[in-house]
Every structure is written in C-alpha cells, then in structure tokens.
Amino acid sequence: MLGRNRKVLIGLCLVLCVPARVRAQPASTCLTQADTAAMIVARLQRTIAWSDSAQLANVGLPKVAANQVVLETSNNVCKKAVPAYRQATGLPSTLTAAYVIRVGSGRLVVVHPAHGAGEYWSFIVINSSNYSYIAWTEG
C-alpha cells in the first residue's frame, strides 16, 4: 500500500511542480484534428476553384490547383503563424494553436473554429515568407 501511495504522491508532485504555463501549452501549435482540418481544406479548395483570380486577389489568395491547398503540420511554421493570427484578430495570447493551411507557395490561411459565428469562421491570410498580415475574410 505504501508503494502505491508513494507513486501517486510522486505523480502529483510532478504535475503540480511543473508551472501551469508549461503544462497548458499544447504539444504543437498546429491544430490537426482530421475531420475539422479536412472540412477547412475542402472549403478553401472549393472557394478557390469557384472564384476567379480577381476575386481571390481581393483577399490575398492565389488561384491554385486543389492539391496546392494543404494542411500545414510543421510546428515551426505554426509557431510563427499563430501569433500573426492573434495580432490580426486581437485574440488573447491564451490562443496557442490554430489550423494553418498552405495555399500555393506564398500564402497561409489561419483559422480557429472558436473564432467566428455559427458556420462562418474568420480566415486570416498571411504571407508565408514573413508572416505578415494580408487579409481577413469570413467563410
């Protein structure tokens, strides 16, 4: 019995001794939940396919093939894209992860399902080379 209690005590100590800020951070800043990611990618692919180049240019997106609209899973990219998203939207620093979609070679679309209303979400388009804000659109 004492051995089990010791293990529980050590486990609690490990959890409680680690600062809350460290414990609260996700393993990755890239959200990758399969169903939601697939829905976001499909929505962007449809929007790009159905829009002409001029419409897309108004929101900072290039006209690309569907296979060039892909979920970004590189934590290095997401670590830079998420702060750009927070800055553009005014969301607090507690938002530490988002879905990041690469559109062609020069654009990233960043979205978080909690930021929007109903079926409409806010999509932020940023430059993939310097993570600067380009446009904000809802869809």
Image: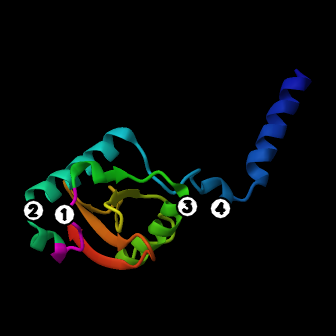
Q: Earlier in the sequence, mark 1 or mark 2?
A: 2
- Which residue lies at the image location 42% right of the left edge and 78% below the top edge? 87
Residue depicted at x 84% and y 39%: 10
Discs 1, 2 touching: Cβ within 8 Å: yes
Range covered by the magenta-colored residues = 57-64
Which numbered mark, 1 or 3, is in the foreground of this view?
A: 1
Q: Which residue is mark 4?
A: 21
Q: Between tags 1 and 2, which lies in front?
A: 1
Question: Dot 1: within a 10 Å radius of its alpha carbon, few (fewer than 14), some, or many (20 or more) residues?
Answer: many
Q: Does label 1 or label 3 sit earlier along the sequence? A: 1
Image-quadrant location for residue 24: bottom right
Q: Residue at x 50, y 69 (%)?
A: 80
* Cα distance in 3D space between marks 1 and 3: 26 Å
Residue farthest to the top, as pictured = 1
Measured as percent of width and height from the top left, residue 68 is found at: 29, 53
Q: Which mark is residue 76?
A: 3
Q: Which mark is residue 63?
A: 1
Q: Earlier in the sequence, mark 4 or mark 3?
A: 4
Name the residue carrying label 2.
51
> Above or below — where is 87 with respect to 107?
below
Task: Please state which amino acid type lies under the numbered disc 2.
Answer: Ser
